Image (cartoon, grey):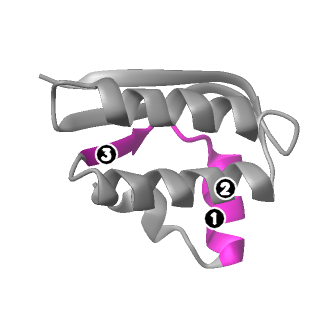
Amino acid sequence: MVETLSLTGELTFNTVQSNLKQLVLLLTRSKTNNLKLDLGQVTQCDSAGLALLIEAKRLSKQYKKKLEISGASQAIYALAEFCGVEVVLNDK
């Protein structure tokens, strides 16, 4: 069983705090160890959003959960590649 958190709209400096709260709730309350972060409806992502994705991976390891990041747009991949952290999006 996979539990999914779908993010929508902007993943930016203005939104990462609320997104982080959602993520922590998922990690702490989920009964399954298989989680998915769906970015398919994210319209914009800046470096703060990318930092959130890195933090999501770190927290998932801390809580001993497997976190797959899916649905990332080409723009998010390009930003991750530019910053040298594209492995965060590819590592399941």
User: The residue tagged with tag 3: helix, strand or loop?
Assistant: strand
* Mark nearer the N terminus (1 vs 3): 3
x, y percent for residue 89: 46, 56
Contact flag, marks 1 and 2 (Cβ < 8 Å): yes
The image quadrant where one finds the N terminus is top left
Q: Residue at x 63, y 64 (%)?
A: 80
User: The residue tagged with tag 1: helix, strand or loop?
Assistant: helix
x, y percent for residue 74: 63, 47
Q: Any mark on residue 80, and which? A: 1
**Quadrant assignment, res 8:** top right
Q: Is residue 35 visible?
A: yes
Q: 37 above or below 30?
A: below
**Quadrant assignment, res 15:** top right
Contact flag, marks 1 and 3 (Cβ < 8 Å): no
Tell whether 27 sits left or right of 22. Answer: left
Q: Is residue 33 magenta?
A: no
Q: 81 above or below 22?
A: below
The image quadrant where one finds the C terminus is bottom left
User: Which residues lie in the magenta part?
Assistant: 66-83
